[in-house]
Amino acid sequence: MGEYSHNIPVQLGSNRPGPHPSSSRRPVDHPEWHVQSPTGYTAGTNLLGEPWQIDRPFKVIVMGAGAAGIDFLHHASNKLADLNIEVKCFEKNADVGGTWFENRYPGCACDGPSPSYQFAWRPNPDWSKYYSSSPEIWQYLKGIVLDEGLDRYIQLRTEVTEARWDDKNGRWVLTLCRADDLASWTEHCDVLLNGTGFLNAWKWPTIPGLHSFQGRLFHTARYEEGFDLKHKRVAIIGSGSSGVQAVASVYSDVSKLYTWVCSPTWITAGFAQKYAGKDGANFEYSEKEKSEWRQDPERYREYRKMIEDEINLRYRAVLRNTAESQKGAESGQEFECDVIICATGFDTSYRPRFPVIGLNGVRLNERWAKIPESYLGIAAPDMPNYFMFTGPFTPVAQGAILPILTAMSNYFMQLIKKMYLHHIRRVIPKDSVIQDFMEHARVYLPRTCWADPCTSWFKQGRPDGPIVMWPGSRLAFFEAVKEPLWEDFDIQYHSKNRFGFLGSGFAKYEFGSAGESSPYLNGEFVHTRPKKEVEAMIESNKQKSDDKALP
Protein backbone atom coordinates (compact mmCIF):
# COMPACT_ATOMS: atom_id res chain seq x y z
CA MET A 1 0.00 0.00 0.00
CA GLY A 2 1.32 3.45 -0.89
CA GLU A 3 3.54 2.00 -3.62
CA TYR A 4 3.09 2.36 -7.38
CA SER A 5 3.51 -0.53 -9.73
CA HIS A 6 6.34 -0.12 -12.22
CA ASN A 7 4.13 -1.70 -14.87
CA ILE A 8 1.38 0.88 -14.61
CA PRO A 9 1.88 4.32 -16.22
CA VAL A 10 1.18 6.97 -13.60
CA GLN A 11 -0.28 10.43 -14.22
CA LEU A 12 -0.72 12.88 -11.36
CA GLY A 13 -4.00 14.72 -11.92
CA SER A 14 -6.30 12.72 -14.13
CA ASN A 15 -7.69 15.79 -15.86
CA ARG A 16 -4.27 16.90 -17.21
CA PRO A 17 -2.75 16.02 -20.59
CA GLY A 18 -0.10 13.30 -20.66
CA PRO A 19 3.65 13.76 -20.38
CA HIS A 20 5.96 14.75 -23.21
CA PRO A 21 7.00 11.72 -25.29
CA SER A 22 10.72 11.07 -24.99
CA SER A 23 11.00 10.98 -28.77
CA SER A 24 9.42 14.40 -29.27
CA ARG A 25 11.51 17.18 -30.80
CA ARG A 26 9.34 19.78 -29.08
CA PRO A 27 7.09 19.96 -26.02
CA VAL A 28 3.49 18.95 -26.67
CA ASP A 29 1.07 21.83 -26.84
CA HIS A 30 -2.51 21.77 -25.59
CA PRO A 31 -5.07 24.52 -26.26
CA GLU A 32 -6.25 24.53 -22.64
CA TRP A 33 -2.78 25.67 -21.61
CA HIS A 34 -3.18 28.97 -23.44
CA VAL A 35 -4.41 30.97 -20.48
CA GLN A 36 -4.56 34.71 -21.04
CA SER A 37 -3.84 37.18 -18.25
CA PRO A 38 -5.89 40.38 -17.73
CA THR A 39 -3.17 42.25 -19.66
CA GLY A 40 -3.55 39.93 -22.64
CA TYR A 41 -0.34 38.00 -22.04
CA THR A 42 -0.14 34.30 -22.94
CA ALA A 43 2.90 32.11 -22.32
CA GLY A 44 4.40 31.04 -25.63
CA THR A 45 5.36 27.62 -26.92
CA ASN A 46 8.95 28.47 -27.77
CA LEU A 47 11.87 26.69 -26.18
CA LEU A 48 14.31 28.69 -24.11
CA GLY A 49 17.03 29.58 -26.62
CA GLU A 50 14.78 29.97 -29.65
CA PRO A 51 14.07 33.30 -31.36
CA TRP A 52 10.90 35.27 -30.84
CA GLN A 53 9.39 33.92 -34.06
CA ILE A 54 10.63 30.72 -35.68
CA ASP A 55 9.77 32.03 -39.14
CA ARG A 56 11.62 35.32 -38.59
CA PRO A 57 15.34 34.66 -38.09
CA PHE A 58 17.26 37.17 -36.02
CA LYS A 59 19.41 39.18 -38.41
CA VAL A 60 22.49 41.35 -37.98
CA ILE A 61 23.85 43.59 -40.75
CA VAL A 62 27.35 45.04 -40.66
CA MET A 63 28.11 48.07 -42.81
CA GLY A 64 31.71 47.95 -44.00
CA ALA A 65 34.25 45.16 -44.49
CA GLY A 66 37.27 47.01 -43.18
CA ALA A 67 39.12 46.03 -40.02
CA ALA A 68 36.00 46.49 -37.86
CA GLY A 69 33.76 44.38 -40.07
CA ILE A 70 36.39 41.66 -40.38
CA ASP A 71 36.90 41.50 -36.62
CA PHE A 72 33.16 41.20 -36.00
CA LEU A 73 32.67 38.53 -38.66
CA HIS A 74 35.52 36.49 -37.18
CA HIS A 75 33.88 36.50 -33.75
CA ALA A 76 30.37 36.02 -35.13
CA SER A 77 31.42 32.94 -37.09
CA ASN A 78 32.65 31.38 -33.85
CA LYS A 79 30.43 32.75 -31.09
CA LEU A 80 27.09 32.92 -32.91
CA ALA A 81 27.47 29.67 -34.84
CA ASP A 82 25.11 27.67 -32.62
CA LEU A 83 22.34 30.28 -32.70
CA ASN A 84 19.82 30.93 -35.45
CA ILE A 85 21.31 34.34 -36.23
CA GLU A 86 21.82 35.51 -39.79
CA VAL A 87 24.79 37.80 -40.42
CA LYS A 88 25.43 39.89 -43.52
CA CYS A 89 28.04 42.49 -44.40
CA PHE A 90 27.81 45.10 -47.16
CA GLU A 91 30.94 46.80 -48.49
CA LYS A 92 30.89 49.72 -50.94
CA ASN A 93 34.37 49.05 -52.33
CA ALA A 94 35.48 46.39 -54.80
CA ASP A 95 37.38 44.55 -52.07
CA VAL A 96 37.70 44.27 -48.30
CA GLY A 97 40.20 46.17 -46.17
CA GLY A 98 38.57 49.57 -45.69
CA THR A 99 41.04 52.41 -45.30
CA TRP A 100 43.98 50.15 -46.22
CA PHE A 101 42.30 49.28 -49.51
CA GLU A 102 41.46 52.91 -50.27
CA ASN A 103 44.64 54.72 -49.23
CA ARG A 104 47.58 53.89 -51.51
CA TYR A 105 49.31 57.25 -51.83
CA PRO A 106 53.14 57.36 -51.82
CA GLY A 107 54.50 56.59 -48.36
CA CYS A 108 51.17 55.50 -46.88
CA ALA A 109 51.90 53.47 -43.76
CA CYS A 110 50.71 52.88 -40.22
CA ASP A 111 52.08 55.24 -37.56
CA GLY A 112 52.04 52.43 -34.99
CA PRO A 113 54.38 49.42 -34.75
CA SER A 114 53.37 46.39 -36.80
CA PRO A 115 53.39 44.04 -33.78
CA SER A 116 50.80 46.34 -32.21
CA TYR A 117 48.68 46.84 -35.32
CA GLN A 118 47.24 43.33 -35.51
CA PHE A 119 44.45 41.35 -33.91
CA ALA A 120 45.39 39.49 -30.74
CA TRP A 121 43.56 36.47 -32.15
CA ARG A 122 45.60 36.61 -35.38
CA PRO A 123 49.27 37.27 -34.57
CA ASN A 124 51.44 37.78 -37.64
CA PRO A 125 55.16 37.01 -37.20
CA ASP A 126 55.86 37.84 -40.86
CA TRP A 127 55.65 41.65 -40.89
CA SER A 128 58.44 42.92 -43.11
CA LYS A 129 59.03 46.16 -41.19
CA TYR A 130 58.51 47.73 -37.78
CA TYR A 131 56.11 50.27 -39.35
CA SER A 132 54.14 48.51 -42.08
CA SER A 133 53.01 49.94 -45.40
CA SER A 134 49.41 50.16 -46.53
CA PRO A 135 49.63 47.27 -49.05
CA GLU A 136 51.10 44.93 -46.42
CA ILE A 137 48.39 45.74 -43.87
CA TRP A 138 45.74 45.20 -46.54
CA GLN A 139 47.26 41.80 -47.35
CA TYR A 140 47.05 40.90 -43.66
CA LEU A 141 43.33 41.76 -43.53
CA LYS A 142 42.57 40.14 -46.88
CA GLY A 143 44.37 36.98 -45.76
CA ILE A 144 42.11 36.68 -42.72
CA VAL A 145 38.99 36.92 -44.87
CA LEU A 146 40.21 34.23 -47.26
CA ASP A 147 41.63 31.88 -44.62
CA GLU A 148 38.49 31.94 -42.47
CA GLY A 149 36.00 32.01 -45.33
CA LEU A 150 34.51 35.27 -44.08
CA ASP A 151 33.73 36.30 -47.65
CA ARG A 152 30.60 34.13 -47.37
CA TYR A 153 29.08 36.95 -45.30
CA ILE A 154 30.27 39.84 -47.49
CA GLN A 155 28.66 41.44 -50.51
CA LEU A 156 31.09 43.80 -52.26
CA ARG A 157 30.39 46.89 -54.36
CA THR A 158 27.15 47.38 -52.44
CA GLU A 159 26.45 50.69 -50.74
CA VAL A 160 23.88 51.52 -48.09
CA THR A 161 22.02 54.61 -49.28
CA GLU A 162 19.54 54.86 -46.39
CA ALA A 163 18.89 53.22 -43.02
CA ARG A 164 15.45 53.76 -41.50
CA TRP A 165 14.12 52.38 -38.20
CA ASP A 166 10.74 50.64 -38.51
CA ASP A 167 9.37 50.85 -34.97
CA LYS A 168 6.17 48.97 -35.78
CA ASN A 169 8.13 45.83 -36.65
CA GLY A 170 11.15 46.54 -34.45
CA ARG A 171 13.83 46.42 -37.13
CA TRP A 172 15.96 48.48 -39.48
CA VAL A 173 15.11 48.82 -43.16
CA LEU A 174 18.16 49.41 -45.35
CA THR A 175 18.09 50.65 -48.92
CA LEU A 176 21.06 49.34 -50.88
CA CYS A 177 22.54 50.06 -54.28
CA ARG A 178 24.84 47.75 -56.23
CA ALA A 179 27.60 49.57 -58.11
CA ASP A 180 27.76 47.10 -61.01
CA ASP A 181 24.28 47.78 -62.38
CA LEU A 182 22.85 50.39 -59.97
CA ALA A 183 20.18 47.90 -58.89
CA SER A 184 18.42 48.98 -55.69
CA TRP A 185 16.64 46.88 -53.06
CA THR A 186 15.88 46.75 -49.34
CA GLU A 187 17.07 44.49 -46.52
CA HIS A 188 15.81 44.19 -42.96
CA CYS A 189 17.75 43.52 -39.77
CA ASP A 190 17.24 43.43 -36.03
CA VAL A 191 20.65 44.92 -35.23
CA LEU A 192 22.62 47.36 -37.39
CA LEU A 193 26.37 47.73 -36.86
CA ASN A 194 28.17 50.67 -38.42
CA GLY A 195 31.73 49.69 -39.26
CA THR A 196 32.31 52.30 -41.96
CA GLY A 197 35.12 53.99 -40.03
CA PHE A 198 35.78 57.56 -38.99
CA LEU A 199 38.33 58.69 -41.61
CA ASN A 200 36.93 57.57 -44.94
CA ALA A 201 34.69 60.37 -46.23
CA TRP A 202 37.52 62.25 -47.96
CA LYS A 203 37.13 65.86 -49.08
CA TRP A 204 38.71 68.24 -51.55
CA PRO A 205 40.11 71.57 -50.35
CA THR A 206 38.00 74.64 -51.11
CA ILE A 207 40.41 76.24 -53.59
CA PRO A 208 38.97 78.23 -56.53
CA GLY A 209 39.89 76.71 -59.90
CA LEU A 210 41.20 73.47 -58.41
CA HIS A 211 39.07 71.24 -60.61
CA SER A 212 39.93 73.15 -63.79
CA PHE A 213 43.61 72.25 -63.33
CA GLN A 214 44.89 70.76 -66.60
CA GLY A 215 47.42 68.36 -65.06
CA ARG A 216 46.77 65.29 -62.89
CA LEU A 217 44.78 65.90 -59.71
CA PHE A 218 44.69 63.36 -56.87
CA HIS A 219 43.40 63.07 -53.35
CA THR A 220 45.56 60.86 -51.14
CA ALA A 221 42.52 58.68 -50.38
CA ARG A 222 41.98 58.13 -54.13
CA TYR A 223 45.52 58.07 -55.40
CA GLU A 224 46.28 56.07 -58.54
CA GLU A 225 48.62 53.41 -57.23
CA GLY A 226 51.75 53.11 -59.35
CA PHE A 227 51.43 56.55 -60.98
CA ASP A 228 54.95 57.65 -62.02
CA LEU A 229 56.01 60.97 -60.47
CA LYS A 230 59.58 60.90 -61.75
CA HIS A 231 60.82 64.17 -63.24
CA LYS A 232 57.45 65.84 -62.61
CA ARG A 233 56.67 69.09 -60.83
CA VAL A 234 54.49 68.10 -57.89
CA ALA A 235 52.46 70.19 -55.46
CA ILE A 236 51.26 68.61 -52.21
CA ILE A 237 48.50 70.50 -50.43
CA GLY A 238 48.16 69.68 -46.75
CA SER A 239 50.65 69.10 -43.97
CA GLY A 240 48.87 66.57 -41.81
CA SER A 241 49.75 62.90 -41.47
CA SER A 242 49.20 61.93 -45.11
CA GLY A 243 50.90 65.10 -46.38
CA VAL A 244 53.99 64.48 -44.26
CA GLN A 245 54.21 60.87 -45.44
CA ALA A 246 53.76 61.80 -49.10
CA VAL A 247 56.39 64.57 -49.02
CA ALA A 248 58.96 62.27 -47.43
CA SER A 249 58.23 59.55 -49.98
CA VAL A 250 58.30 61.48 -53.27
CA TYR A 251 60.84 64.28 -52.80
CA SER A 252 63.77 62.25 -54.17
CA ASP A 253 61.92 61.30 -57.38
CA VAL A 254 60.29 64.53 -58.53
CA SER A 255 61.99 67.38 -60.41
CA LYS A 256 60.32 69.99 -58.19
CA LEU A 257 58.25 69.69 -55.04
CA TYR A 258 56.01 72.37 -53.60
CA THR A 259 54.26 72.09 -50.27
CA TRP A 260 52.65 74.72 -48.08
CA VAL A 261 52.07 74.72 -44.35
CA CYS A 262 49.20 76.99 -43.34
CA SER A 263 49.53 76.29 -39.62
CA PRO A 264 52.11 74.60 -37.40
CA THR A 265 52.07 70.81 -37.50
CA TRP A 266 52.45 68.95 -34.21
CA ILE A 267 54.55 65.84 -34.77
CA THR A 268 55.33 63.53 -31.88
CA ALA A 269 57.88 60.78 -31.56
CA GLY A 270 56.71 57.45 -32.99
CA PHE A 271 54.70 55.02 -30.90
CA ALA A 272 57.05 52.67 -29.00
CA GLN A 273 59.96 54.46 -30.66
CA LYS A 274 62.44 52.95 -28.18
CA TYR A 275 62.00 49.61 -29.97
CA ALA A 276 62.32 51.10 -33.47
CA GLY A 277 65.55 51.72 -35.37
CA LYS A 278 68.13 54.42 -34.71
CA ASP A 279 66.48 57.76 -33.89
CA GLY A 280 63.08 56.11 -34.22
CA ALA A 281 63.62 55.10 -37.83
CA ASN A 282 61.81 52.22 -39.48
CA PHE A 283 63.66 48.94 -40.01
CA GLU A 284 63.14 45.57 -41.63
CA TYR A 285 62.77 42.36 -39.67
CA SER A 286 65.28 39.67 -40.57
CA GLU A 287 64.22 36.28 -41.87
CA LYS A 288 65.81 34.77 -38.77
CA GLU A 289 63.59 36.84 -36.47
CA LYS A 290 60.45 35.95 -38.39
CA SER A 291 61.37 32.26 -38.42
CA GLU A 292 62.00 32.23 -34.66
CA TRP A 293 58.66 33.91 -33.98
CA ARG A 294 56.81 31.44 -36.20
CA GLN A 295 58.38 28.54 -34.33
CA ASP A 296 57.92 30.09 -30.88
CA PRO A 297 54.57 31.96 -30.69
CA GLU A 298 55.05 32.61 -26.96
CA ARG A 299 58.30 34.45 -27.64
CA TYR A 300 56.54 36.57 -30.25
CA ARG A 301 53.72 37.27 -27.78
CA GLU A 302 56.27 38.53 -25.24
CA TYR A 303 57.79 40.83 -27.87
CA ARG A 304 54.35 42.20 -28.73
CA LYS A 305 53.50 42.64 -25.06
CA MET A 306 56.67 44.66 -24.51
CA ILE A 307 55.61 47.08 -27.27
CA GLU A 308 51.97 47.21 -26.12
CA ASP A 309 53.00 48.05 -22.55
CA GLU A 310 55.09 50.94 -23.84
CA ILE A 311 52.17 52.28 -25.90
CA ASN A 312 49.74 52.04 -22.98
CA LEU A 313 52.12 53.94 -20.69
CA ARG A 314 52.41 56.66 -23.31
CA TYR A 315 48.86 57.92 -22.65
CA ARG A 316 50.13 59.68 -19.53
CA ALA A 317 51.95 62.14 -21.77
CA VAL A 318 48.59 63.31 -23.12
CA LEU A 319 47.70 64.79 -19.74
CA ARG A 320 48.85 68.35 -19.14
CA ASN A 321 51.40 69.21 -16.45
CA THR A 322 52.58 65.65 -15.90
CA ALA A 323 56.23 64.61 -15.88
CA GLU A 324 55.67 62.59 -19.06
CA SER A 325 54.17 65.55 -20.95
CA GLN A 326 57.26 67.75 -20.34
CA LYS A 327 59.55 65.43 -22.34
CA GLY A 328 58.48 66.06 -25.06
CA ALA A 329 55.29 81.55 -49.91
CA GLU A 330 54.50 85.00 -50.61
CA SER A 331 50.81 85.84 -51.23
CA GLY A 332 49.76 85.75 -54.88
CA GLN A 333 52.83 83.90 -56.14
CA GLU A 334 52.13 81.29 -58.82
CA PHE A 335 53.84 77.90 -59.18
CA GLU A 336 53.76 75.74 -62.30
CA CYS A 337 53.24 72.04 -61.65
CA ASP A 338 52.25 68.84 -63.43
CA VAL A 339 50.60 67.02 -60.53
CA ILE A 340 48.61 68.17 -57.51
CA ILE A 341 48.17 65.80 -54.58
CA CYS A 342 45.58 66.95 -52.06
CA ALA A 343 46.40 65.59 -48.62
CA THR A 344 43.50 67.52 -47.16
CA GLY A 345 41.88 64.88 -45.02
CA PHE A 346 38.32 63.83 -44.42
CA ASP A 347 34.93 64.90 -43.20
CA THR A 348 35.50 64.40 -39.47
CA SER A 349 32.04 65.39 -38.25
CA TYR A 350 31.12 61.71 -37.71
CA ARG A 351 27.83 62.47 -39.44
CA PRO A 352 26.94 59.51 -41.70
CA ARG A 353 27.26 60.03 -45.44
CA PHE A 354 23.76 58.60 -46.00
CA PRO A 355 20.47 59.21 -44.13
CA VAL A 356 20.19 57.31 -40.84
CA ILE A 357 16.67 57.82 -39.53
CA GLY A 358 15.86 56.56 -36.06
CA LEU A 359 13.05 56.66 -33.53
CA ASN A 360 10.26 59.17 -34.25
CA GLY A 361 11.94 60.17 -37.52
CA VAL A 362 15.04 61.64 -35.87
CA ARG A 363 17.82 62.05 -38.43
CA LEU A 364 21.29 61.37 -37.08
CA ASN A 365 22.83 63.99 -39.37
CA GLU A 366 20.63 66.65 -37.81
CA ARG A 367 21.00 65.34 -34.26
CA TRP A 368 24.78 65.55 -34.66
CA ALA A 369 24.84 68.96 -36.36
CA LYS A 370 26.61 70.66 -33.43
CA ILE A 371 28.29 67.83 -31.58
CA PRO A 372 28.11 64.06 -32.16
CA GLU A 373 26.78 62.91 -28.80
CA SER A 374 27.17 59.22 -28.06
CA TYR A 375 27.05 56.58 -25.38
CA LEU A 376 30.66 55.46 -24.75
CA GLY A 377 31.29 56.03 -28.46
CA ILE A 378 29.34 52.88 -29.35
CA ALA A 379 25.67 53.92 -29.42
CA ALA A 380 23.80 57.01 -30.59
CA PRO A 381 20.76 58.85 -29.22
CA ASP A 382 17.36 57.95 -30.69
CA MET A 383 18.87 55.08 -32.69
CA PRO A 384 17.50 51.72 -31.44
CA ASN A 385 19.58 48.59 -32.05
CA TYR A 386 22.22 50.74 -33.77
CA PHE A 387 25.83 50.37 -32.68
CA MET A 388 29.08 51.82 -33.93
CA PHE A 389 32.69 50.78 -34.23
CA THR A 390 34.96 53.81 -33.66
CA GLY A 391 32.05 56.18 -33.18
CA PRO A 392 32.49 59.65 -31.65
CA PHE A 393 34.33 59.58 -28.30
CA THR A 394 36.05 56.22 -28.78
CA PRO A 395 39.84 56.03 -28.12
CA VAL A 396 41.04 56.40 -31.70
CA ALA A 397 44.25 58.25 -30.71
CA GLN A 398 45.32 56.28 -27.66
CA GLY A 399 47.05 53.42 -29.46
CA ALA A 400 46.51 50.84 -32.18
CA ILE A 401 42.85 50.56 -33.12
CA LEU A 402 42.63 46.81 -33.80
CA PRO A 403 42.55 45.69 -30.13
CA ILE A 404 39.87 48.35 -29.57
CA LEU A 405 37.76 46.84 -32.35
CA THR A 406 37.99 43.44 -30.69
CA ALA A 407 36.80 44.92 -27.39
CA MET A 408 33.80 46.38 -29.23
CA SER A 409 33.06 43.11 -31.00
CA ASN A 410 33.06 41.32 -27.66
CA TYR A 411 30.62 43.90 -26.29
CA PHE A 412 28.32 43.59 -29.30
CA MET A 413 28.38 39.78 -29.07
CA GLN A 414 27.06 39.94 -25.52
CA LEU A 415 24.40 42.42 -26.50
CA ILE A 416 23.25 40.48 -29.57
CA LYS A 417 23.05 37.20 -27.66
CA LYS A 418 20.92 38.77 -24.93
CA MET A 419 18.60 40.38 -27.49
CA TYR A 420 18.21 37.05 -29.27
CA LEU A 421 17.75 34.82 -26.23
CA HIS A 422 15.55 37.21 -24.22
CA HIS A 423 13.41 38.30 -27.18
CA ILE A 424 14.34 41.96 -26.90
CA ARG A 425 12.61 44.10 -29.48
CA ARG A 426 14.71 47.20 -29.13
CA VAL A 427 17.48 48.55 -26.93
CA ILE A 428 18.47 52.20 -26.85
CA PRO A 429 20.72 54.17 -24.48
CA LYS A 430 18.81 56.44 -22.12
CA ASP A 431 19.20 60.10 -22.98
CA SER A 432 20.01 60.94 -19.35
CA VAL A 433 22.87 58.44 -19.47
CA ILE A 434 24.21 59.93 -22.70
CA GLN A 435 24.14 63.40 -21.14
CA ASP A 436 26.02 62.11 -18.09
CA PHE A 437 28.72 60.64 -20.31
CA MET A 438 28.97 63.84 -22.36
CA GLU A 439 29.25 65.92 -19.19
CA HIS A 440 32.07 63.70 -17.95
CA ALA A 441 33.91 64.08 -21.27
CA ARG A 442 33.51 67.88 -21.23
CA VAL A 443 34.90 68.11 -17.71
CA TYR A 444 37.75 65.65 -18.26
CA LEU A 445 39.14 66.48 -21.72
CA PRO A 446 40.41 70.04 -20.95
CA ARG A 447 43.14 68.42 -18.85
CA THR A 448 44.61 66.83 -22.00
CA CYS A 449 46.93 68.20 -24.67
CA TRP A 450 44.08 67.84 -27.15
CA ALA A 451 42.58 70.99 -25.64
CA ASP A 452 45.46 73.14 -26.92
CA PRO A 453 44.41 75.79 -29.50
CA CYS A 454 44.89 74.02 -32.82
CA THR A 455 42.85 72.92 -35.80
CA SER A 456 42.47 69.16 -35.68
CA TRP A 457 40.16 66.46 -36.99
CA PHE A 458 39.18 65.48 -33.43
CA LYS A 459 38.08 69.08 -32.76
CA GLN A 460 35.71 69.16 -35.73
CA GLY A 461 38.33 71.05 -37.76
CA ARG A 462 38.06 74.20 -35.60
CA PRO A 463 40.61 75.61 -33.10
CA ASP A 464 37.82 76.09 -30.57
CA GLY A 465 35.79 73.04 -31.58
CA PRO A 466 34.55 70.45 -29.08
CA ILE A 467 37.06 67.69 -28.40
CA VAL A 468 35.60 64.42 -29.69
CA MET A 469 37.87 61.92 -27.97
CA TRP A 470 37.60 59.17 -25.38
CA PRO A 471 38.09 60.71 -21.92
CA GLY A 472 40.83 58.42 -20.68
CA SER A 473 43.27 55.71 -21.64
CA ARG A 474 42.74 52.78 -23.96
CA LEU A 475 42.82 50.41 -20.99
CA ALA A 476 40.08 52.42 -19.27
CA PHE A 477 37.95 51.97 -22.39
CA PHE A 478 38.49 48.21 -22.30
CA GLU A 479 37.18 48.19 -18.73
CA ALA A 480 34.19 50.39 -19.63
CA VAL A 481 33.01 48.06 -22.40
CA LYS A 482 33.91 44.75 -20.78
CA GLU A 483 30.19 44.00 -20.50
CA PRO A 484 26.98 45.95 -21.16
CA LEU A 485 25.53 47.96 -18.28
CA TRP A 486 21.89 47.10 -18.91
CA GLU A 487 20.67 49.77 -16.50
CA ASP A 488 21.94 52.36 -19.01
CA PHE A 489 19.41 51.25 -21.65
CA ASP A 490 15.71 51.49 -22.28
CA ILE A 491 14.70 47.94 -23.20
CA GLN A 492 11.49 46.89 -24.92
CA TYR A 493 10.51 43.25 -25.42
CA HIS A 494 8.56 41.57 -28.19
CA SER A 495 6.24 40.09 -25.56
CA LYS A 496 4.00 42.03 -23.20
CA ASN A 497 5.88 40.26 -20.43
CA ARG A 498 9.67 40.47 -20.13
CA PHE A 499 9.73 36.80 -19.13
CA GLY A 500 7.99 35.75 -22.32
CA PHE A 501 11.28 34.29 -23.54
CA LEU A 502 10.75 31.43 -21.05
CA GLY A 503 7.91 30.27 -23.32
CA SER A 504 7.12 26.59 -22.86
CA GLY A 505 9.28 26.37 -19.76
CA PHE A 506 11.78 24.04 -21.40
CA ALA A 507 15.32 24.64 -22.60
CA LYS A 508 16.06 24.00 -26.25
CA TYR A 509 18.66 21.31 -25.56
CA GLU A 510 16.11 19.21 -23.63
CA PHE A 511 14.46 18.16 -26.89
CA GLY A 512 16.77 16.42 -29.31
CA SER A 513 19.67 18.86 -29.27
CA ALA A 514 22.98 17.06 -29.02
CA GLY A 515 25.29 17.88 -26.17
CA GLU A 516 25.68 17.65 -22.45
CA SER A 517 22.22 17.68 -20.82
CA SER A 518 23.51 17.97 -17.26
CA PRO A 519 26.20 20.67 -17.42
CA TYR A 520 25.67 21.50 -13.76
CA LEU A 521 27.52 18.30 -12.81
CA ASN A 522 30.60 19.91 -14.34
CA GLY A 523 30.05 23.08 -12.37
CA GLU A 524 28.54 24.80 -15.42
CA PHE A 525 25.00 26.07 -15.62
CA VAL A 526 25.07 27.06 -19.27
CA HIS A 527 24.54 24.44 -21.94
CA THR A 528 27.04 24.46 -24.76
CA ARG A 529 27.24 22.29 -27.82
CA PRO A 530 30.11 19.81 -27.98
CA LYS A 531 33.23 21.38 -29.47
CA LYS A 532 33.27 18.94 -32.39
CA GLU A 533 29.66 19.77 -33.26
CA VAL A 534 30.33 23.52 -33.22
CA GLU A 535 33.44 23.06 -35.36
CA ALA A 536 31.45 20.97 -37.83
CA MET A 537 28.75 23.65 -37.93
CA ILE A 538 31.33 26.38 -38.59
CA GLU A 539 32.90 24.32 -41.38
CA SER A 540 29.48 23.67 -42.87
CA ASN A 541 28.70 27.38 -42.83
CA LYS A 542 31.92 28.09 -44.71
CA GLN A 543 30.64 25.96 -47.57
CA LYS A 544 27.43 27.91 -47.88
CA SER A 545 27.15 30.74 -50.33
CA ASP A 546 23.59 31.84 -49.61
CA ASP A 547 24.71 35.11 -48.08
CA LYS A 548 26.60 35.97 -51.26
CA ALA A 549 23.62 35.46 -53.53
CA LEU A 550 22.57 38.66 -55.23
CA PRO A 551 18.96 39.76 -54.89
Image: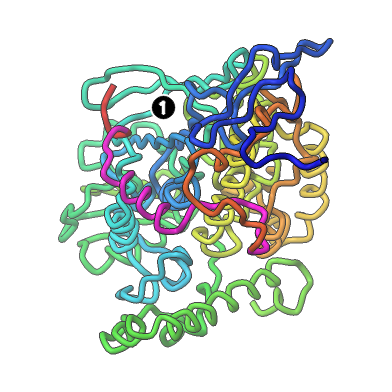
Q: For the point 84% across and 10% down, which residue is it?
A: 38
**Magenta-colored segment: predominant secondary structure:** helix
Looking at the image, which is closer to me, 384 or 394? 384
Q: Which type of secondary structure does the marked residue at label 1 adopt?
A: strand
Residue annotated with mark 1? 160
Determine if residue 427 is in view: no
Quarter placement of the C terminus? top left
Looking at the image, which is closer to me, 487 or 354? 487
Q: Position of residue 177 (x, y in %)?
A: 33, 22
Which residue extends farthest front? 1
Task: Tell me the crowding category of disc 1: few under 14, some 14 to 19, or many 20 or more residues within 10 angstroms, Cα based.
Answer: many
Q: Position of residue 444 (x, y in %)?
A: 80, 55
| Left or right relative to 119: residue 294 | left
Indicate yes or no whether the magenta region holds residue 538: yes
Q: For the point 18% across and 55% down, which residue is it?
A: 226
Looking at the image, which is closer to me, 260 or 205? 205
Quarter placement of the N terminus? top right
Determine if residue 58 is in view: yes
> What range of the chain is rendered magenta?
522-546
Q: How many marks?
A: 1
Q: Position of residue 253 (x, y in %)?
A: 21, 65
Circle 1: residue type: Val
| Left or right relative to 389: residue 201 | left
Q: Is residue 428 above or below residue 520?
A: above
Q: Position of residue 197 (x, y in %)?
A: 48, 44
Q: Is residue 427 above or below residue 42?
A: below
Q: In this figure, which colouring scheme has been used for the structure? A: rainbow
Indicate yes or no whether the magenta region holds residue 313: no
